[in-house]
Amino acid sequence: MTDNLHQLAGQISALFHQAIQAANEEVDAIIQSGAQDTRRIEHQLDHMLGFCCDPDMLLVFKRLCRYYYGIDPAATADYVYAYREMWDTPDEAEHESASV
């Protein structure tokens, strides 16, 4: 049983690594080309959102959000709120609302 859990954990870790690598490549391509295609950008943000529990993916997500803010600030804010809703802990949410 323990071996199966270790194997599963290794597979999940490998999938996260692959997802982060693929996201980095796509975000680099979007930014370097100056892409303005909101569907492409939002598709990438949607894909990354589910992996933002990983700090490395969160960095990529933030990088694309910073880029997208110059194109569509309102949509970018929606993605930031979606991230907060999905991944912020209650303690973080209380701290943020107290500091506003």
Image (tube, rainbow, N blue to C red):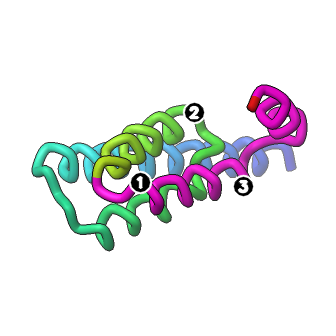
Q: How many angstroms separate mark 2 from mark 3 (CA)?
A: 14 Å
- Quarter of image, res 60: top left
Q: Residue furthest front?
A: 100
Disc on res. 86 = 3
Q: Label 1, on which residue?
A: 73
Residue at 58% in and 43% down:
13
Precedes in sequence: disc 1 or disc 2: 2
Q: Position of residue 76 (x, y in %)?
A: 46, 55
Disc on res. 55 = 2
Crowding near pointer 1: few (<14 within 10 Å), some, many (20+)?
A: some
Q: What span is in magenta?
A: 71-99
Main SS type for the magenta part?
helix
Query: Left or right of 84: which side holds 5?
Result: right
Q: Is residue 56 above or below residue 42?
A: above
Q: Position of residue 75 (x, y in %)?
A: 46, 62
Query: Dot 2 lies on which element?
Result: helix
Q: Position of residue 21 (x, y in %)?
A: 36, 44
Q: How many angstroms separate mark 3 from mark 1 (CA)?
A: 20 Å
Precedes in sequence: disc 2 or disc 3: 2
Q: What type is the residue that disc 2 sits on?
A: Pro
Residue at 60% in and 39% down:
54
Task: Please state which of the two labelled residues, at mark 2 or mark 3, is closer to the viewer.
Answer: 3
Task: Please state which of the two labelled residues, at mark 3 or mark 1, is closer to the viewer.
Answer: 1
